[in-house]
Every structure is written in C-alpha cells, then in structure tokens.
Image (cartoon, helix red, strand yellow):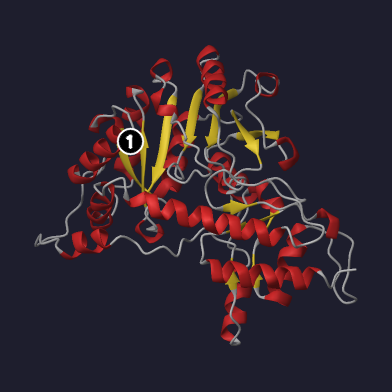
Amino acid sequence: MKLSQKIQEMELSPIRKFVPYADQARAAGKKVYGLNIGQPDIKTPRAFFDAVQNFDQEVLAYANSQGIPELLEALVGYYKRIGLDFEKKDLLITNGGSEALSMIMTAILDPGDEVIMAEPFYTNYKTFIKAAGGNIVAIPTTAEDGYQYAVREKIEGVLTPKTKAIAIINPGNPTGKVLTKEEMDLIIDIVVKNDLYLICDEVYREFVYDGKSMSTFGAYKEAAQNVIIVDSVSKRFSACGARIGSIASKNEDLMKNLMKICQARLCVPTLDQVGSAALYNLDPSYFDDIKKEYEYRRNVSVEALNEIEGIKYGVPEGAFYLFPKCSSFFGKSDGETTIHNSTDLAMYLLEKGHVATVGGDAFGDAECFRMSYATSDENITEAMRRIRDVLAKLK
C-alpha cells in the first residue's frame, strides 16, 4: 500500500527532533537546558484554573463548533481593547493557532497555489501549506539586512498568477522582527491591489520591546476582506497546553466556509475554552511585568552572545527567540566530531553541553540556529556559558 505524495513530502517537526535525545540525557541524570521550544516558564494565570474548577455543569457536552459564547465574548472584548471592532460572527475558536492556520490554508489554497512568506519562518508553515496542496514562495532575509522583507520590489518581484496569499508572522518567529507602520502600509497596499489574502499570525502581539509598540493588521478597514488574523493563548498567557487559538476576519464568505471544517471536527474542548475565556478577560496590565521580564531575558541572552567568538545575530524586537548565525563553525572539529551544518551544531550542543537548540535549516536558513529565551535568566546564563565553552573546543 502506498501513502499519499503530499504526506511523504512533509517533514517531522525539526523543533521536536531533539526531544528524544534530551529525554535520554535527563534519564541519565543530566540537566538539559531546553532552549529549543518556545515554552514559557511564566506561571499560567490562576484565573484559568479557577474558571475550570468552578465549571459546574452536570454533563460535559459538545460545545458549539464556532466556540462557546463566553470565550467569543471575551475575545470581542480583548479586540475592542486594542482598537478592533470584531463581532462574535467574525470569530472562530480553534484547537490552537496551528489548527487555525491549517484551516485557513485548506480553505484558500488549490493545488499549486502559492503563499509568499519572509524567510526564515516558523517551520510548521511548511506542513500547513503542503497539506493544503500549496507552495511557499520565500523572500530570503538576513540579520545583516534587519530581516527586511516589506519592500515593494521584493514582494512584487515574486508575485505570480498562482499567488493566493501573503503570510506574515509579526513579531517574527524565529527572527523577532517587528514591522513598522510604514512597512504594514506597504503590505496592505499590495494585497488590496492584487486581491490577495493576508494571513496575519500575531500570537506574540504583546511582546514588543525597547519602548516600541506594534500595530495590528486588523486596524486596516480598507483591507477588511483581505485580512485574516490568527491568535492563540499559548504564548500570550503561558497556556500552551490549553490548545486554544482563534481566527478573526470580516470576510463573511471565508468565515462561512471555514465553519464547514469547524463542524467536521465537531468542537474545541469545552474546559480549555472556559479557562481561556477567563484569560482574555484579564486586565491588560497583566502583560506589563511579563513584557519587562522577556525584555530582560533577551538582554541577558544578547550580552552572553557577545562573549562567543564567531557568533553573529540580530537583536530581536519582539517575541522570545534569537536566531544567531553560526556558519563560522562549519568545517571545524574537536578531533572527534566535525560540524557540517546548523543541525550538526545543535546536536553537538546537546550532546556535549546538554543545551537543546534547533538547527536553522528547519526555518529556511541553514547558517543559523534558533534558541528561545522563554526560560529563566539563570537557565539562560548557564546555557549560554555551556554553549560558549562547547564551541570553544571546535578548531
């Protein structure tokens, strides 16, 4: 029996690739510093657990396929606080931001259709788009050019009759790039003129640093039919295990057809929705201290990177990832192991230093590796010391 071509062309998650190796090290009594997955160590707000514990229905029945009313109303309020006028009819609750993206790609892409993305990008987009029969058209960027992709010539230069959408991760994963208002204006102009969908992954919206603020693509009324916003409680509220995401769009035809997929998977787990409604009802001041903490951790990480000879990097403006360039170590050896690429380097750091990172080839830039600073400054400091000491052995 033969599997489908599209499933054979997909890849296993490179981010989770090193988890079994890390588990083996832990089983052997080693402490592993996990910088590979964006799993915050910030405590999930107590409001989530209180809401679940106070759930008192006698039957845990199917929820509405669109989402429970309490969560939809909480999302309406959240968006209103950031200046957006989404109504409940403009929203769908999903099993995490991942299902939201998968649904969107299924709804808009025919076989061979293209989605433009800045590269490097979050690796699972490959899976979402390939599963829907589409192809990614990448706009390569580097730390040296500030991960700049919102340039008319760059975007219009890759437009084809097959282009269906532009997908934006803002703030960027893995780069931390935050678009300026002028860059957003340009992207909006292009999608409106070319009648394209604009998929806006804004799950790190609150985490923008250095006194900067971030606009949302949902604020552009002239592009209301083009814009599709993806959100999630995972990173925003340190509730990754809740698996609650959402889609927001004023495009009634799109939302009506997305409901076909929502109904096919029946519903999102009720208790996770109950807890997430409480999260979205939190006062916005909740983010103040957390944002400061992530900015502090970024600074600790950057200062430590400055002490590692041969590493280059761009300072992230948002989210909680660094994407250092490590190609200067390719071809070097400690006498036993030779580093050929960023995946080799990530494995070397795990085996020799017990620090888990991710090779950059997974994100579209094989000269870099990704590390998350969503862990404590103590863990970051020790992990970076280990990275420095391990890399110093390569000659």
Above or below 34: residue 192? above
Mark 1 crowd level (few <14, some 14–19, many ≥20, 10 Å Cα):
some
Above or below 305: residue 313? above
Residue at the location (32% across, 51% down)?
286
Above or below 182: residue 140? below
Residue 237 in sight: yes
| Residue that carries the numbered disc 1 in the rendered image | 260
Q: Quadrant of residue 135?
A: top right
For the residue labelled by badge 1, is the local secondary structure a helix, a strand or a loop? helix
- Which percent across, then down, holds residue 12? 60, 57
Residue at the location (53% across, 41% down)?
171
Residue at the location (75% across, 62% down)?
307
Above or below 379: residue 205? above
Residue 14 in sight: no
Q: Nearer the viewer, residue 64 or 332?
A: 332
* Residue type for callout 1: Lys
- Which percent across, then down, holds residue 277? 24, 49
- Which percent across, then down, holds residue 7? 59, 49
Residue at the location (39% across, 25% down)?
219
